[in-house]
Image (cartoon, rainbow, N blue to C red):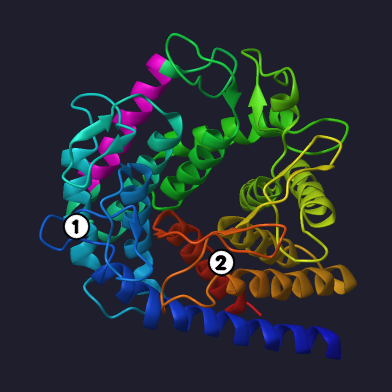
């Protein structure tokens, strides 16, 4: 090991410990006391920065699903609070108030569980599957039922929303554009369900989405991943079809690396590497040193806003790239891990412990707003990836 690599690895261990300590000592207590109603089992959409209490903002159903994931990981990260109770009680509320009987999950509910928007959104179904995976893993007494619920939801998705070529449509009847982003989270959920032993259907789904991404979502010339598509999975017309998000280049890079390693698929690893290169070369603002929101397909900047979640995906992708690299190339990825960590921690400054800011504009100003619960999933996942990496170096 070179002196440079040893220094980088030591710095990464320090950063990983700092992030884990912050999550365990500040974030989980904060989101347990202020972001969760222990009586009803409901999770709040946001926490007010001043009062530290959950707000009455409408709750996107992806939020309780994500919070179930977070608290299911709390024990692994070392939180000694009642995480299992939160998962079980929160899951009960989620299934009772967010699921439409005999069908899929609604889009938005009130804090009392009243449906405000019952429309189908593929994105929300992906997070239901992720919640089933992680809740089923830690709630062993409910595992069989939760894995059956997941399989039932997949059956529904395939029957009513399955695309004749691969993947899924946005609605039935069809609605354009088709989107890669929900598939990214379906890919993540499928890998999670595969890893917890929920059945071969999840390996099949992961393989299907990986191929769809490599064949259709990723541009064959530039190697960049698009967001919006026509019904035949060709790029959508106009400016919308040109959109590429740096955070999603990183996130798909992380997922394709996971899948490529598991399947020994070198094409996936090569495409993951190219996605990372695009993200780091074009999607990180050289002055603010943060991952920005959107690019055009020529890699020019479209939206320079930098949200918190993009920093976590940069961090995860840098970790995964370091894990499949050697020598000077690995050193460069290790340095990027530290850059991404520094970017992420910027969002934790000047707010109460355990909360965060979300939107950082090109004028170096953060938007003043309640802290969004949806960011916690990104932070927890990044911390887990970083911790796992550190256990192997």
The residue at the point 81 percent across, 49 percent down is 278
Note whether 324 is above or below 174 in the view shown.
below
Note whether 381 is above or below 56 in the view shown.
below
Spot occupied by residue 330 in the image (x, y as percentages of width and height): 81, 70
Q: Which residue is mark 2?
A: 385
* In this picture, residue 360 sits left or right of residue 135: right
Spot occupied by residue 378 in the image (x, y as percentages of width and height): 50, 59
State whether the magenta stretch is mostly helix, strand or loop. helix
How far apart are labels 2 and 1 at the CA level? 24 Å
Q: Check disc 2 and report its element: helix, strand or loop.
A: helix
The residue at the point 46 percent across, 65 percent down is 380
Q: Which residue is mark 1?
A: 88
The residue at the point 82 percent across, 38 percent down is 223
Q: Check disc 1 and report its element: helix, strand or loop.
A: helix
Magenta stretch, residue numbers: 144-160
Of 63 and 101, the residue lying toward us: 63
């Amino acid at each position: 090991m070179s002196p440079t690599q040893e220094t980088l690895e030591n710095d990464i261990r320090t950063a990983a410990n700092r992030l884990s300590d912050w999550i365990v000592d500040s974030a989980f207590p904060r989101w347990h006391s202020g972001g969760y109603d222990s009586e009803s089992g409901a999770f709040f959409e946001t926490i007010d920065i001043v009062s530290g209490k959950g707000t009455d903002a409408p709750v996107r159903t992806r939020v309780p699903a994500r919070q179930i994931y977070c608290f299911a990981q709390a024990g692994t990260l070392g939180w000694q609070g009642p995480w299992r109770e939160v998962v079980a009680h929160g899951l009960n509320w989620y299934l009772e108030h967010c699921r439409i009987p005999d069908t899929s999950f609604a889009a938005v509910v009130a804090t009392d569980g009243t449906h405000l928007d019952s429309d189908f959104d593929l994105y929300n179904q992906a997070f239901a599957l992720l919640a089933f995976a992680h809740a089923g893993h830690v709630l062993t007494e409910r595992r069989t039922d939760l894995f059956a619920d997941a399989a039932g939801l997949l059956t529904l998705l395939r029957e009513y929303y399955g695309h004749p070529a691969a993947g899924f449509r946005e609605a039935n009847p069809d609605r354009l554009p088709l989107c890669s982003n929900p598939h990214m989270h379906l890919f993540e959920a499928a890998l999670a369900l595969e890893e917890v032993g929920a059945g071969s259907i999840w390996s099949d789904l992961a393989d299907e989405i990986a191929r769809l991404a490599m064949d259709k979502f990723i541009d064959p010339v530039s190697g960049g991943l698009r967001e919006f598509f026509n019904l035949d999975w060709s790029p959508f017309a106009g400016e919308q079809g040109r959109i590429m998000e740096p955070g999603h280049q990183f996130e798909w890079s992380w997922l394709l690396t996971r899948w490529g390693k598991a399947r020994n698929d070198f094409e996936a690893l090569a495409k993951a590497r190219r996605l990372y290169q695009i993200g780091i070369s074009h999607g990180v603002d050289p002055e603010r040193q943060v991952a920005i929101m959107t690019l055009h397909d020529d890699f020019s900047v479209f939206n320079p806003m930098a949200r918190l979640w993009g920093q976590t995906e940069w961090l995860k992708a840098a970790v995964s790239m370091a894990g499949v690299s050697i020598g000077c190339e690995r050193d460069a990825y290790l340095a990027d891990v530290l850059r991404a960590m520094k970017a992420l921690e910027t969002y934790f400054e000047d707010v109460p412990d355990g909360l965060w800011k979300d939107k950082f504009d090109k004028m170096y100003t953060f938007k003043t707003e309640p802290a969004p619960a949806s960011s916690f999933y990104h932070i927890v996942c990044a911390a887990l990836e970083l911790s796992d990496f550190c256990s192997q170096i």
